[in-house]
């Protein structure tokens, strides 16, 4: 077992740990566009590729009331193979006459439909099951492009304000089901002009004519009523950790996050806990030097994309991110009290894509004794004073990442280069112990030694530094 000791003049011991894995696997399959929906079964079971307007009866339809059940969107799903991108659409009720369905495709994934971007269209006759597909170009209402979703990220209830131009007929098939409420369609990657599997954002709408946006009746997007995306996200966060912690102490847990998705992504961070106690605080840092210890160069993580969650910031595919999770335990805990803390990383591009680690914190009686001495009591100006600190691990378990902080005595000046401590990282404060760096620039007010190896009960060591009496 490992633990931390915390003392002033003193020792402060901090703990360290890590995170685990999730990769999104899409259901990619070939669909025969013939009105038989049986080949959509596996896709419709995937919560990342299937969305519901409302969605799924658990939230209100933000476009309600829709004028016709034949245009009242219910479900949308997607899949693809090396030749085609396939779309599945379900509506609330059948309509014998033609109804129109529009799929706005944002292939630069900037969240905007700019003039010239593509709109896939399906004209669907419920009675005959006939489906004619077309490809249009979008004509944006705003010079810089129109958002695919509202300020809350919702495609449901959001009508695209632009118009359409062009209209190239792609194919005429019977893609409607015999029930009149399900429809399937496809568009070749070559017709779009991108490589197979290229991810994009999308927005779905229905209307009773091509007079857009005036005649649009209903809107939807991806899961949760949000903007739709075919981006295949993935994340690995590892490994699980088990540490000991003092009552009112701190544990630092080092984790690695890897973006395994198709492109750059941002991963939101959150925690939950169960057991005998809950953490007082949980903070997140980027561990720039990867040493698993809090340091002056480590960066406190914030909400970089304004969605209300602390996140990693943009991460490229395959590049490891060193995450340091700093957990503080409340006071008043008893020996062997335990907390199970779950750290979760979730994709901003695909919020259902997550991975978690389970960190186990056990309260321990790890402790440390310190004996400080000086070579002389003389305070004669010009006198060189040598201070020595002998530390001993006095607890019942290993002390892990122990930190010892000692103030430079008042009315003396630290002698640059004099601080020593085998097996430690030495840092200096110039502001009364508020912050630390590796520089010995005057004034040095405090010295911090971080012991880099665990201390078993009874282990000891010696630290020293010198000051000069002015």
Image (cartoon, grey):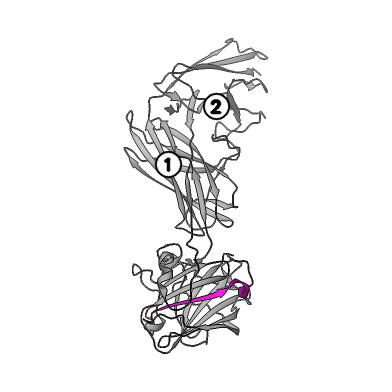
Q: Can residue 403 be seen in this view?
A: yes
Between residues 75 and 10, which one lies in front from this camera angle? Answer: 75
Q: Mark 1 points at which residue?
A: 281
Q: In this view, does 88 lie to the left or right of 446?
A: left
Residue 171: % across, % down: 55, 82
**Is 345 drawn above or below residue 339 in the view shown?**
below
Between residues 120 and 388, which one lies in front from this camera angle? Answer: 120
Name the image quarter holding residue 380: top right
Q: How crowded is mark 2: few (under 14 residues within 10 Å), some or many (20 or more)?
A: some
Query: Which disc, if any, is residue 452?
Result: 2
Task: Point out the frontmost of discs 2 and 1.
Answer: 2
Q: Write the residue at 63% across / 19% down.
A: 467
Name the image quarter holding residue 296: top right
Q: Write the residue at 43% across / 84% down.
A: 129
Element under label 1?
A: strand
Name the image quarter holding residue 331: top left
Q: Can residue 390 be seen in this view?
A: no
Residue 201: % across, % down: 54, 67
Between residues 90 and 274, which one lies in front from this camera angle? Answer: 90
Between residues 182 and 112, which one lies in front from this camera angle? Answer: 182
Element under label 2?
A: loop
């Amino acid at each position: 077992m490992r633990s931390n000791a915390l003392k002033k003049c003193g020792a402060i011991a901090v703990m360290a740990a890590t995170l685990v894995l999730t990769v999104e696997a899409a259901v990619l399959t070939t669909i025969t566009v013939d009105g038989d929906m049986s080949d959509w079964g596996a896709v419709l079971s995937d919560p990342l590729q299937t969305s519901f307007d409302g969605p799924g009866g658990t939230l209100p339809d933000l476009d309600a009331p829709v004028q016709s059940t034949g245009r009242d969107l219910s479900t949308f799903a997607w899949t693809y193979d090396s030749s085609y991108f396939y779309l599945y659409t379900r509506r609330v009720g059948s309509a014998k006459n033609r109804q129109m369905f529009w799929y706005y495709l944002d292939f630069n994934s900037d969240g905007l439909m700019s003039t010239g971007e593509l709109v896939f269209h399906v004209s669907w006759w419920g009675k005959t099951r006939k489906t004619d597909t077309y490809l249009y170009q979008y004509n944006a209402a705003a010079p810089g492009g129109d958002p695919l979703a509202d300020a809350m990220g919702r495609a449901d209830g959001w009508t695209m304000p632009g118009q359409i131009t062009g209209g190239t007929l792609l194919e005429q098939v019977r893609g409607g089901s015999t029930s009149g409420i399900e429809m399937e369609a496809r568009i070749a990657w070559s017709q779009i002009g991108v490589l197979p599997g290229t991810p994009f954002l999308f927005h779905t709408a229905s209307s009773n004519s091509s007079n857009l946006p005036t005649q649009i009746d209903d809107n939807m997007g991806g899961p949760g009523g949000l903007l739709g995306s075919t981006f295949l996200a993935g994340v690995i966060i590892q490994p699980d950790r088990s540490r000991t912690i003092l009552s009112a102490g701190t544990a630092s847990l080092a984790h690695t996050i890897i973006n395994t998705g198709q492109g750059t992504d941002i991963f939101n961070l959150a925690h939950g806990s169960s057991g005998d106690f809950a953490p007082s605080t949980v903070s997140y840092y980027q561990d720039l030097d990867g040493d698993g210890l809090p340091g002056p160069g480590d960066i406190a993580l914030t909400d970089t994309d304004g969605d209300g969650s602390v996140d990693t910031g943009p991460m490229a595919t395959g590049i490891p991110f060193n995450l340091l999770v700093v957990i503080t335990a409340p006071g008043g805990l008893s020996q062997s009290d335990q907390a199970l803390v779950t750290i979760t990383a979730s994709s901003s591009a695909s919020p259902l894509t997550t991975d978690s680690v389970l960190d186990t914190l056990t309260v321990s009686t790890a402790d440390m004794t310190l004996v400080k001495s000086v070579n002389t009591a003389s305070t004669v100006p010009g006198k060189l004073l040598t201070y020595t600190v002998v530390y001993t691990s006095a607890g019942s378990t290993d002390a892990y990442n122990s930190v010892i902080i000692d103030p430079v005595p008042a009315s003396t000046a630290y002698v640059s280069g004099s601080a020593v401590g085998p097996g430690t990282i030495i840092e200096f404060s110039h502001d009364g112990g508020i912050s630390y760096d590796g520089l010995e620039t005057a004034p040095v007010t405090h010295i911090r030694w971080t012991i880099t190896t665990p201390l078993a009960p009874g282990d000891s060591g010696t630290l020293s530094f010198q000051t000069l009496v002015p």
